[in-house]
């Protein structure tokens, strides 16, 4: 499966059970990347996409259900337990510091991932968002 | 765990809002230190008006109250004119337990649930700033942050404001940016565009500003920009007794239109600086004994190393922990410097608070990690590309910084609308 995350400068994901930030340009990019593929997420994340015409797979245990080649948008949980199933990581970086009490629970490089691509684009409310693509080192 | 108990007194009062009227009443109160458990804050149906102080010691503490007069002297844009005809007053006292600082820049309070009452939540933007108390100290600042009150222009100088307890003091190598104190906006400029308002500026450590307050401010600002919604936001400085420097600030926020679904927090940010001891009564400071001993050890080691080498060079003070505290006269002189001298940092730094002087350097030092091209604001990693070298491709006007945040803030002052701020070669 392919994991999609959004992180701040401290690899933070959430604070007080709430996402750190959001941006419509990130959602558009996710729609573009996952077009024609299955995109899994839970109900909390699904509400962020309610105004977008996307075919989402909403399940609370989506990480357990996703199959090879599927995309998973993860906001509120660690993914270390599923790391062996991960084929690719797509990380959107806010290039900002927010408070955080939930972080990405591993460093991609230490789990055998290498950054194979990077793209910067302006967000709606963020000056610059960086999209990184990490794949397993061959 | 030992806990520091803070006393938070809330004065909730309805204000005469018909037309442009306001109550303009002064409130004052004195409360004694109490070991009582936390008291709930009750909602009041008038417009909120708060006053706070803190007591963490054994002695009795007199609390001052601040007048909240939105129509007089305080900015209040797009106020929610509810049209109440009567002035009502209610007083609530709550005690908040603040853990003793243990290495984290902030502590969550009341389960991260702010103390707002329903009447304070507004889908129309406004901002209020408490009057200074008898000692000249700030009180609570509150806003319903919306896009219509966010800044549209670069921040101007705030160097002329000297908050209570202000000292210009440097701890090179100990404090990020060297200067211990910054003028700390209670309502950050990025939220309400408030500039040199002395009712909104306190003496805060660099650490409290950057590590404590700024991330929360960023989160609120970006949410409002993204959604167009409002965030109820209040920052209350908590002073112990008659201290001139606050122990910290209580930051509360709740997104309004979505009922706190996206933004909800209540945190106390510690006004501390690791490695430095602060006398909160006066703002005087000194290196922590451990830090000073470490510095002395480093200095001794360096001296021994030099002696071993038989170096003729004169031993200099170690940069890492050297504190340079101006003599009283010098401090006074600096404090009264012309605005153009003290405003320089405000022109180059976009973060919420500013040091008296910039931490930028025009020549690289051992701690310089980033260099900004003063012509176009492009940020470089020192040593990562020819722009920071000595060849013909090197920048003509590099300005060096120890941290990326400082470099970015400087860059934003030069090129505020630049979307690609980082050098493509370095990153």
Image: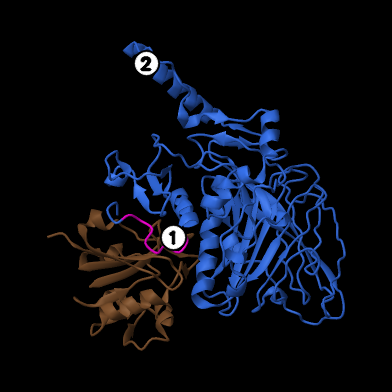
Chain colours: A brown, B blue
Question: Would residue B37 be seen by someone viewing this image from the given angle?
Answer: no
Q: Chain of mark 2?
A: B
**On the rendered structure, is B231 left or right of B313?**
right
Q: Residue at x 52, y 52 (%)?
A: B349
Q: Chain of mark 1?
A: A
For the view shown, which residue lies furthest in the left direction?
A: A138
Q: Residue at x 46, y 71 (%)?
A: A125
Query: Residue B340 falls in which quadrant of the image?
Result: top right
Mark 2 and mark 1 in contact? Answer it, CB < 8 Å.
no
Question: Would residue A1 be seen by someone viewing this image from the given angle?
Answer: yes
Residue B170 sits above or below residue B109 on the image = above
Query: How far is disc 2 from disc 1 in space, using C-alphas?
Result: 43 Å
Residue occupied by mark 1: A96
Identify which residue, B144 or A48, lies in the foreground: B144
Label 2: state its secondary structure: helix
For the stretch drawn in magenta, the main secondary structure is loop
Q: Residues within 10 Å of mark 1 (few under 14, many from 20)?
A: some
Residue occupied by mark 2: B306
**On the rendered structure, is B25 left or right of A138?**
right
Identify which residue, B114 or B65, lies in the foreground: B65
Residue A29 sits above or below residue B414 on the image = below
Q: Which residues are magenta?
A: B416-423
Residue B271 sits above or below residue B275 on the image = below
């Amino acid at each position: 499966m392919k994991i999609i995350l959004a992180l701040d400068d401290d690899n933070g994901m959430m604070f007080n059970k709430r996402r750190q930030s959001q941006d419509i340009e990130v959602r558009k990019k996710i729609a573009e990347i996952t077009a024609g593929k299955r995109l899994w997420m839970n109900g909390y994340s699904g509400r962020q996409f309610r105004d977008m015409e996307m075919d989402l797979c909403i399940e609370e245990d989506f990480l357990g259900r996703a199959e090879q080649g599927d995309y998973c948008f993860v906001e509120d949980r660690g993914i270390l337990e599923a790391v062996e199933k991960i084929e690719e990581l797509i990380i959107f970086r806010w290039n900002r510091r927010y408070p955080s009490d939930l972080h990405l629970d591993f460093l991609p490089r230490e789990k055998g991932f290498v950054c194979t691509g990077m793209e910067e684009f302006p967000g709606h409310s963020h000056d610059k968002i960086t999209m990184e693509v990490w794949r397993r080192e061959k | 765990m030992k806990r520091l108990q803070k006393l938070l007194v809330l004065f909730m009062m309805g204000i005469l809002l018909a037309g442009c009227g306001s109550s303009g009443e002064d409130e004052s109160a004195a409360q004694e230190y109490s070991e009582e458990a936390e008291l709930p804050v009750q909602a009041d149906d008038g417009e909120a008006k708060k006053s706070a102080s803190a007591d963490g010691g054994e002695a009795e503490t007199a609390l001052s109250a601040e007048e909240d007069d939105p129509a007089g002297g305080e900015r209040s844009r797009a106020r929610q004119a509810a049209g109440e005809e009567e002035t009502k007053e209610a007083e609530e006292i709550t005690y908040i337990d603040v853990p003793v600082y243990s290495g984290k820049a902030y502590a969550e309070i009341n389960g991260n649930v702010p103390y707002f009452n329903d009447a304070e939540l507004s889908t129309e933007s406004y901002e209020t700033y408490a009057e200074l108390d008898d000692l000249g100290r700030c009180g609570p600042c509150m806003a319903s942050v919306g896009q219509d009150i966010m800044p549209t222009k670069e921040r101007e100088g705030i160097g002329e404001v000297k908050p209570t307890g202000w000292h210009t003091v440097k701890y090179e190598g100990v404090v990020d940016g060297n200067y211990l104190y910054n003028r700390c906006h209670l309502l950050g400029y990025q939220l309400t565009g408030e500039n040199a308002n002395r009712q909104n500026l306190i003496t805060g450590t660099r650490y409290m500003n950057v590590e404590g307050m700024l991330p929360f401010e960023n989160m609120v600002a970006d949410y409002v920009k993204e959604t167009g919604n409002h965030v109820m936001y209040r920052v209350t400085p908590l002073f112990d007794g008659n201290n001139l420097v606050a122990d910290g600030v209580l930051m509360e926020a709740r997104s309004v239109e979505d009922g706190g679904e996206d933004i909800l927090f209540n945190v106390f940010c510690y006004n501390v600086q690791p490695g430095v001891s602060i006398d909160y009564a006066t703002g005087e400071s000194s290196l922590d004994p451990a830090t000073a001993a470490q510095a002395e050890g480093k200095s001794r080691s360096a001296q021994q190393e030099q002696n071993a080498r038989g170096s003729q060079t004169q031993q200099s003070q170690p940069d890492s922990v050297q504190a340079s505290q101006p003599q009283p006269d010098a401090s006074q002189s600096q404090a009264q410097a012309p605005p153009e001298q003290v405003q320089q940092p405000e022109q180059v730094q976009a973060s919420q608070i500013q040091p008296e002087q910039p931490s930028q350097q025009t020549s690289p030092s051992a701690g310089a990690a980033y260099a900004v091209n003063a012509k176009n604001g492009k940020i470089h990693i020192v040593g990562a590309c020819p722009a920071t070298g000595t060849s013909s491709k090197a920048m003509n006007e590099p300005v060096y910084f120890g941290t990326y945040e400082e470099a970015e803030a400087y860059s934003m002052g030069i090129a505020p609308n630049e979307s690609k701020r980082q050098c493509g070669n370095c990153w």
